[in-house]
Image: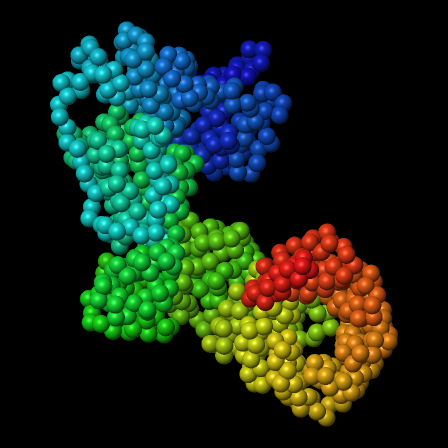
Amino acid sequence: MDIRILGPVRVVMPGGLAIVGPKERALVASMVTSSGFVAAHDVIARQLWPNKQVSDPTLIRGIYRQLRSRMPEHTLQRNSAMSCALLIDPQSVDLYRFRDLVSRAQSLEGPERLSALRSAVEIWEGAPLADLMDTEFGRERRLLVAEFRSSLLQYLRDEVEFGSREECRAKLEDIRDGWFGSGEAWELLRPDVERYETSGTTKALPAAALRVAGTDIGRITCPRPVPQQIPPHPANLVGRASELEEISAALLSPEEAPPHGIVVLRGQPGVGKTVLALRWAVTHLDEFPDGVLYSDLRGFSDVPPAAADEVLAGFFEQLGITGAAERSPGRLSEAMRSELAGRRVLCILDNAADADHVRPLLPGNGFCATIVTSRDRLDGLLVHEGAQAIEVGPLDDVAAVELLSSRVGDDHVRSTGFLLKEIASYCGGLPLALSIVGASIRARKPGAAREVRDAFREPRTRLNPLDLGRGASVPAAFAISIDRLSEAAKDLLWRLALHPGPTISAQALDWLAGDGTDEVRRARQELESRHLLGEPALSRYALHDVLRECALKIADEQPAAARDLARAHVFDFLLHNAWACDQVLVPDRNLPVGEADGIETVVTTSAGEAMRWLSTEYDTITAAIRQAERLGLYRYLWLLPMTLVTYQWRKSRYADAVRYLTLAWDAAERVADPGDQAMVCRMLAGTRLRMQDFDLAKSWMYRAGAIVDGSAGCWGEAENRHGLGIVHGECAEWDEAIALISAAVTLFRERGAVVSEAGALGSLAEVYRGKRDLVAARSHCDEARAVAERTADGNGLAGIISLSGRIHREAGDLPSALDEFAAAAAVYREYEYERNEVRALLSMAEVAGSLGRHSLVDAVLTRAAEAASSIDGAAELVDQVSDARRRLEA
């Protein structure tokens, strides 16, 4: 198959059969000129029926069916609801053959490059899409001609240097005599041909070709102005070294080749896109001898956006080009590209609204470079113009403090510099916020930094230091972006502001918005496209803290019932999902969480999956607990910490457990039943026990006992006796411990609480081991193991297996002890209980060393070191592993 669009459109089948229907050829052209050969229905309708509003897809489907009947099998996919697709080898299309030759030429030099470029230029048979004049392919024609013109200029330069000037003359004569004799394509190439017709000499060649040929342009052209339109801006750029390097890599070719291409600097309001673009321009002025053009497009501003003709007229004036006013509206863009051909100009298009706002202002594919800044993603420029996007994010903490310090002045740094780190943290790394706060402090007497810090700490006044009025206000900058949003996006934004952060999962976002409809998806994409919603990790989203404060103002304007319902969605989603994971970790624990009522909860098939979900959501859940405290949401304030405590124990986050369980206790006293209050006390006791704080552990257990006193036979009574027996055992009070735990075993057994029964039997075995009664310890341990093996509580089983290893070791049966410690470590690893895994591995290494199995010792300690290093705040375990290695090696 041969498809040609660089001239009259031709579609020739294998065997020579050609497709002659104009609409069929136009549909092929639409697919060929679309990315990936896939054309959307709305684009096809615009191109094939430019003067009609075609909304009925059956017209397109009819043409598509005709093509399917004539083209080879599998060439066309089945027509989808929204697009038509062509499945062909790109080499069957003349456009792609042309592009491949041009691409190959870039890797060649001298005559070889000339030969490739000459072959590329010769592929063109005329104006692209030349015989589809009753269709609307104007934009596609302009892009194709601009692409050809760039290659033509390169070819002319090489023909002058390595070939024949007569060939140049002949090619330009071909153009003049009708190759592009009419239409839009001719208008783009007219300046080159007219220069030839006027002079009849090498003056006709583009300026860039003359440079390559060594001609003194100054003797044959009039001097022209060199614009330098870079506006005033801060001279110190902090924390942007990597972004500057990215811009240079994108716009400056190696080996001192001319600049080229388009860079899009995109990011949220106030993140410093404009200053970054201007500072890069200032440091690379030598790369652009023909000047720098700048325009504030006012895409996100409180005044109307700048029109393309307005901007281009200003560029013409700066370039010293007359006659701009006489040109017809809409034709300045083509004229500008022609004028910039061969010049090395940097164009900075600041604050663009969207891709269509920018396109008429872009130079052609020649020697110019362009930097576009926008709050919008401008994905269209990446797809169609080949722009390279650079995400400009907030400054890191170090750079933020450095920028703030430079803004407040030396006097304030000396007097209250110790406050700047905290103040900078409230600015969220936004250079605009840091500059506004810095200017405010600098203008006042010493001590102003403390007042600013205090204002940030108070939620009611948190935005005040960021607002100095018109032109210097972070809330106003965000408000401009918010005002441009659709109603659905605004609604989603204020709901997200109620979420505690720091991130929210895609599933939680859908639940928060009320459903997972296409409207919600589009609203989320709209927020993302305007850089109001980030995705710091896959399928996890985040609002900037300053934006959250601004959006909360919108939330305050909503009906109280709507706000309360949105908050309930947030907390219910977290509570039910955390509870689902906790039930996998501790099947016997009962909490009055209630039914999920339509919430899609996480499905975990193992403790490892449950631990991973809780790890991902840990910061969000703890933020929700703190928010529940501020809002007085006592039910969530006691239930959420209870769903986290097992995870915290396994991750050795004991300080966090104490902090949040203490809040839970205060809330439970207000709203929970006595049995649930006692359960919170037991969790606090268990945490203190793990911290080796036996007095406080005992105190909390006695408090739990006092709450359920008189409720004989209740579940809490069994748990209390078990917990209090463990504390007495840790204090070597053996008889009290045995009596209490034995009573708990009986109660658990009566109620069929198998997991709890196994745990209590294990505790009883541990007490007898401590008492040095290894026979009784062995008996109770075996009984505990038999019961645990009937449950799904793998972590509890691992603890009993590890206890069995200790009993065997103390009884002198080292091989059996080694096997038990290895089995326990494997189960702990599966359940991601790293601290206990490390302890089991250390015991295993000690026994292996006693048995003389030194290679096993090395492997076990290596794994123990890896596990210990992954635990937060476990420096003592890391030291224990190091000490064990030194001791066993000795």
From where the camera sits, is residue 4 visible?
yes
107 to 716, vertically: above or below: above
Where is the N terminus found, in terms of image quarters? top right
Q: For the point 22% across and 72% down, which residue is it?
A: 446
**Residue 106 or residue 7, whichever sits in front:** 106
390 to 150, vertically: above or below: below
Which quadrant of the view contains residue 167? Answer: top left
362 to 708, vertically: above or below: above
Q: For the point 59% across and 30% down, which residue is it?
A: 77
Q: Going by the image, does 552 lie left or right of 767?
A: left
Which quadrant of the view contains residue 356? Answer: top left
Q: Position of residue 342 (x, y in %)?
A: 26, 24
Q: Position of residue 641 (x, y in %)?
A: 58, 73
Q: Going by the image, does 277 lie left or right of 713?
A: left
Where is the C terminus found, in terms of image quarters? bottom right
Q: For the point 52% across and 60% down, which residue is it?
A: 504
Q: Going by the image, does 763 lie left or right of 31?
A: right
